[in-house]
């Protein structure tokens, strides 16, 4: 049941005005950092006058504020880029605009996408769409919440280790993290280049198919993009699906396991075979991720030195003080923690013991996945061990926060497509998502599977 379709035959100016009015009514969630109202209305008038058309003609959408986009600053939710106006737009945004879509605002995130709750935003956290005392999830929390609140029919996010899937699960919407290289990363603020992916939030699988088919494809500006392969497809009957046992342990809240088992029952009822499978390397995935990713973060964030662009400290006397104070003032604590860990694991004395070892373990994890995919079409498990947690519950302890990523980082390290599908709620009314993981480049097959099982009760 496409929601995008509802927007296509209406006035674009009306679509934009309604989306912006709804965004203003819902300011208390703090899902958006800025509105791009003037530019959006200008583009909408062009759509209504027949100057812009396409498959997303007049459809409003929101981008996570780490996508370079015109009409408002691109802050990455950091003081470092607070006043940064993008000189160009991300390829993903350009492709959507070429089909007539209209960006109405920029969504909150953990600063530089470092986090799993959106509490690391330098501008304050986003609140969960179902319970304002709880987190939105992260790092793409704002994008998930604007989709869940029906402000726009789709929103863009980035997923490096779970940042689309986890907030999708916490807010009861669909979230797709495609195969690494499916969508160009050009014009998106880099976090960890070997696992960064671009995807979207929607309220149904058909809309995700449409948005992904537009955004995906080879981009000469990003040499890691894959040749075009994403094409919506029919669901393959009688699939073999592996339920990842390692993701169903005691550490996962019982109601999350219950919702997962119910989804498994639906798969079986639809004629698929589901069997328990083991992924022993999964227990090392979090450790590997929190070495590899900070290493890449420390390299990618080195460009913010107060000299070229971004925040510059005032009244400094030496070059060292300029670098130091600019970075101290521009980054949040979590950014600094990752820069320090990354620099440490890459330093000459520790490179072999940490970084190299982590990359070897990563290869073993990739091999385990590849082995499973010789027998199975897809894997299933929860997205996160728990539903949305209370605001502030994990902020004092970074390890506790990182543990929420335990089931999303494996697919990221292996570059596999994975989607978060709404699977119902807990008894307290909090949404729970299940995660479907596919073979590399099986993105459209995963969405087709999710679409074939879609039913109304999981929507809010
Ligand atoms: N929560 C994970 C982290 O903190 C994922 C972040 C992301 O995917 N951008 O690294």
Image (spheres, helix red, strand yellow):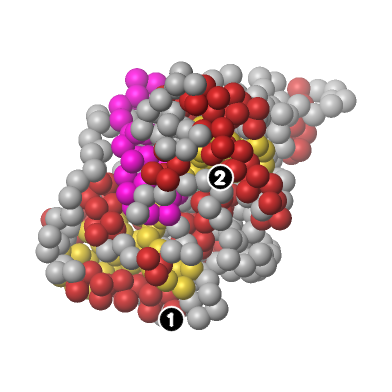
| First of labels 2, 1 by sequence position | 2
Dot 1: element: helix
Q: Is residue 191 left or right of residue 360?
A: right
In the rendered image, residue 287, in percent from the top left (x then y), is placed at 45, 57
**Residue at image coords 55%, 25%:** 45
Residue at the disc numbered 1: 254
Q: For ligand 1, tell me if the residue under mark 2 lies within 8 Å.
A: yes
The number of discs equals 2
Q: Compared with residue 304, is residue 295 higher up or lower down, i.e. above or below? A: below
Q: Compared with residue 17, is residue 367 higher up or lower down, i.e. above or below? A: below
- Is residue 360 visible in the rendered structure shown here? no
**Residue at image coords 53%, 75%:** 429
Instruction: For the N terminus, give its image quadrant.
Output: bottom left
**Residue at image coords 58%, 19%:** 87
Residue at the disc numbered 2: 113
Q: Mark 2, residues whose alpha carbon is within 10 Å: few (<14), some, or many (≥20)?
A: many
Q: CA distance from mark 2 to mark 1?
A: 29 Å
Q: Is residue 313 left or right of residue 271?
A: right
For the magenta stretch, what is the residue range? Answer: 199-223
Q: Is residue 213 left or right of residue 11?
A: left
**Residue at image coords 22%, 73%:** 276
Q: Considering depth in this image, is 204 or 370 the residue closer to the camera?
A: 204
Q: Is residue 54 magenta?
A: no
Q: Is residue 221 magenta?
A: yes
In the rendered image, residue 6, in percent from the top left (x then y), is placed at 42, 45
Q: What numbered label is drawn on residue 442?
A: none
Q: Considering depth in this image, is 340 or 454 the residue closer to the camera?
A: 454
Q: Considering depth in this image, is 184 or 293 the residue closer to the camera?
A: 184
């Amino acid at each position: 049941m496409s929601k995008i379709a509802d927007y296509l035959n209406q006035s674009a100016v009306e679509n934009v005005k309604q989306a912006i009015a709804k965004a203003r009514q819902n300011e208390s969630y703090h899902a958006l950092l800025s509105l791009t109202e003037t530019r959006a209305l200008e583009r909408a008038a062009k759509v209504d006058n027949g100057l812009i058309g396409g498959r997303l003609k007049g459809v409003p959408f929101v981008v996570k504020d780490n996508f370079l986009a015109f009409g408002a600053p691109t802050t990455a939710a950091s003081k470092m880029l607070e006043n940064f106006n993008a000189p160009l737009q991300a390829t993903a945004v350009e492709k959507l605009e070429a089909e007539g879509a209209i960006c109405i605002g920029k969504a909150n995130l953990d600063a530089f996408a470092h986090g799993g709750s959106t509490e690391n935003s330098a501008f304050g956290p986003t609140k969960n769409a179902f319970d304002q005392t709880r987190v939105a999830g992260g790092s793409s929390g704002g994008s998930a919440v604007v989709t869940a609140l029906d402000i726009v029919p789709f929103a863009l996010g980035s997923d490096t280790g779970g940042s689309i899937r986890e907030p999708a699960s916490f807010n009861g919407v669909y979230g797709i993290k495609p195969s690494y290289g499916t969508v160009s990363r050009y014009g998106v603020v880099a976090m960890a280049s070997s696992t960064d992916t671009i995807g979207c939030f929607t309220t149904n699988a058909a809309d995700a198919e449409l948005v992904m088919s537009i955004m995906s494809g080879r981009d000469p500006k990003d040499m890691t993009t894959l040749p075009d392969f994403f094409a919506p497809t029919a669901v393959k009957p009688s699939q073999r699906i592996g339920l990842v046992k390692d993701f169903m342990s005691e550490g996962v809240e019982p109601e999350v396991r219950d919702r997962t088992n119910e989804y498994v029952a639906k798969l079986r009822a639809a004629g698929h075979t589901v069997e328990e499978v083991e992924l022993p390397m999964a227990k090392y995935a979090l450790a590997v991720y929190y070495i590899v990713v900070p290493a890449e973060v420390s390299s990618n964030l080195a460009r913010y030195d107060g000299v070229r662009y971004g925040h510059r400290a005032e009244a400094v006397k030496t070059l060292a003080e300029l670098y130091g104070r600019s970075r101290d003032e521009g980054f949040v604590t979590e950014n600094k923690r990752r820069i320090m860990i990354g620099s440490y694991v890459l330093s000459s004395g520790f490179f072999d013991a940490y970084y190299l070892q982590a990359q070897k373990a990563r290869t073993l994890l990739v091999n385990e996945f590849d082995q499973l995919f010789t027998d199975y079409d897809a894997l299933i498990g929860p997205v996160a061990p728990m539903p949305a947690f209370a605001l502030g519950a994990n902020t004092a302890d970074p390890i506790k926060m990182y543990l929420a990523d335990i089931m999303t980082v494996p697919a990221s390290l292996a570059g596999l497509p994975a989607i978060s599908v709404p699977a119902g709620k807990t008894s307290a009314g909090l949404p729970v998502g299940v995660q479907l993981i596919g073979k590399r480049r099986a993105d459209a097959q995963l969405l087709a599977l999710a679409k074939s099982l879609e039913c109304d009760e999981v929507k809010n």
